[in-house]
Image (spheres, rainbow, N blue to C red):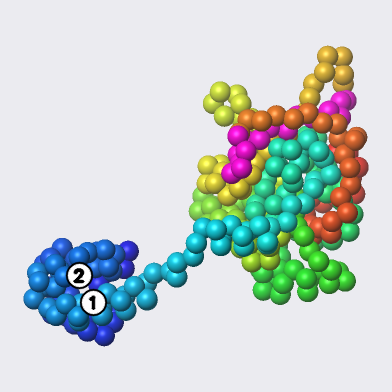
């Protein structure tokens, strides 16, 4: 809310501000939503003068109206959907990764998170701490993704694998700046997704809640960051010691009911032809063991 004050627009004098406050009008919202004729009588001021002030304040402090139909058409024309190469995950994601959104894959070691990087035409930027990650994301935002990419091709997605590897070490204890830096990362990732119309995908570790159920790591504050979250787990079969089968559970979504579950085999994962732009927090990306 914007508080009314002397001089914020022509005609809004200190005397008028005092009179408006006496009529219980203290903010711009109060003024523009009140009955102008009735308020003019209460404040002993010209109706035309008060109407002019109201129009100026509306122009200064309100957004230009846009119809919902226009916003929807803009969304349809600007949004692209990228396949993960895995039909089961694409089903949970409502066809794939959406540009302009931040999606999270959370799972324990060997659950299949990094299998998302089994993609062609991917450029890797190794980062091993929060400062390197922030520097990399600031560079993308300032310089632009196309200029930073090898060959200047069309960038479709940014992947951070794994976001928990660089954020977890700065959280907890007496490191009071850890939470602030985590939210800086979140803000930059969302800004990049929106400003450059790319899909942002992050991987995260998991922990267990008080009931023993799996949940994504990094705590409650981070839980609000991803638009979509999928939890990955090994699918244990009787007598099997090294199964490549996994379950994917939709834990958070803005488009589909939560708790939907799909099963898939990592060995059958397809490869996408989209160019992707990867930021990795892992030291051994060449490791072929799915994790």
Image quadrant in which the N terminus is located: bottom left
Q: Name the residue under label 2.
A: 36
**In this picture, which residue range is highlighted in magenta?**
242-257
User: Which residue does the image show at 26% across and 85% down from the upper left?
Assistant: 10
Say which of 276 and 47 sits in front.
Answer: 47
Q: Mark 1 points at which residue?
A: 51
Q: Residue 76 appears in which quarter of the rendering? A: bottom right
- Does residue 184 appear in this view? no
Mark 2, other Cα within 10 Å: few <14 / some 14–19 / many ≥20:
some
- Does residue 280 appear in this view? yes
User: Which residue does the image show at 68% across and 62% down from the upper left?
Assistant: 78
Q: Is residue 187 left or right of residue 24?
A: right
Say which of 261 and 47 sits in front.
Answer: 47
Above or below, comparing residue 163 to residue 63 in the picture? above
Q: In this view, does 139 lie to the left or right of 30?
A: right
Q: In this view, does 253 lie to the left or right of 6?
A: right
Mark 1, other Cα within 10 Å: few <14 / some 14–19 / many ≥20:
some
Above or below, comparing residue 229 to residue 241 in the picture? below
Residue 145: percent from the left, percent from the top?
75, 68
User: Which residue does the image show at 27% across and 68% down from the upper left?
Assistant: 32
Q: Indicate whether residue 44 is drawn in magenta.
A: no
Q: Residue 27 appears in which quarter of the rendering? A: bottom left
Above or below, comparing residue 20 to residue 289 in the picture? below
Q: Indicate whether residue 246 is drawn in magenta.
A: yes
Instruction: Evaluate if marks 2 and 1 touch, with contact meaning CB atoms under 8 Å apart.
Output: yes
């Amino acid at each position: 809310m914007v508080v009314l004050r002397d001089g914020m627009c022509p005609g809004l004098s200190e005397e008028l501000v005092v009179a408006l406050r006496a009529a219980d009008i203290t903010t711009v919202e109060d003024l523009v939503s009140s009955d102008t004729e009735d308020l003019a009588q209460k404040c002993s001021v010209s109706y035309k003068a008060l109407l002019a002030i109201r129009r100026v304040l509306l122009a200064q402090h309100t957004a230009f109206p846009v119809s919902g139909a226009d916003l929807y058409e803009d969304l349809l024309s600007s949004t692209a959907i990228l396949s993960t190469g895995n039909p089961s995950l694409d089903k949970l994601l409502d066809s794939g990764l959406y540009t302009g959104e931040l999606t999270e894959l959370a799972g324990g070691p060997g659950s299949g998170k990094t299998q998302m990087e089994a993609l062609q035409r991917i450029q890797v930027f190794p980062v091993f701490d929060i400062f390197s990650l922030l520097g990399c994301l600031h560079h993308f935002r300032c310089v632009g993704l196309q200029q930073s990419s090898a060959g200047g091709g069309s960038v479709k997605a940014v992947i951070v694998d794994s976001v928990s590897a660089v954020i977890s070490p700065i959280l907890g204890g007496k490191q009071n700046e850890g939470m602030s830096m985590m939210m800086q990362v979140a803000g930059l990732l969302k800004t990049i997704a929106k400003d450059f119309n790319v899909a942002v995908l992050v991987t995260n570790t998991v922990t267990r809640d008080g009931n023993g159920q799996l949940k994504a790591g990094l705590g409650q504050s981070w839980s609000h960051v991803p638009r979509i979250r999928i939890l990955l787990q090994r699918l244990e079969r009787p007598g099997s010691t090294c199964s490549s089968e996994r379950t994917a559970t939709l834990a958070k979504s803005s488009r589909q009911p939560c708790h939907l579950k799909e099963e898939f085999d990592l060995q059958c994962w397809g490869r996408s032809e989209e160019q992707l732009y990867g930021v990795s927090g892992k030291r051994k990306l060449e490791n072929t063991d799915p994790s």
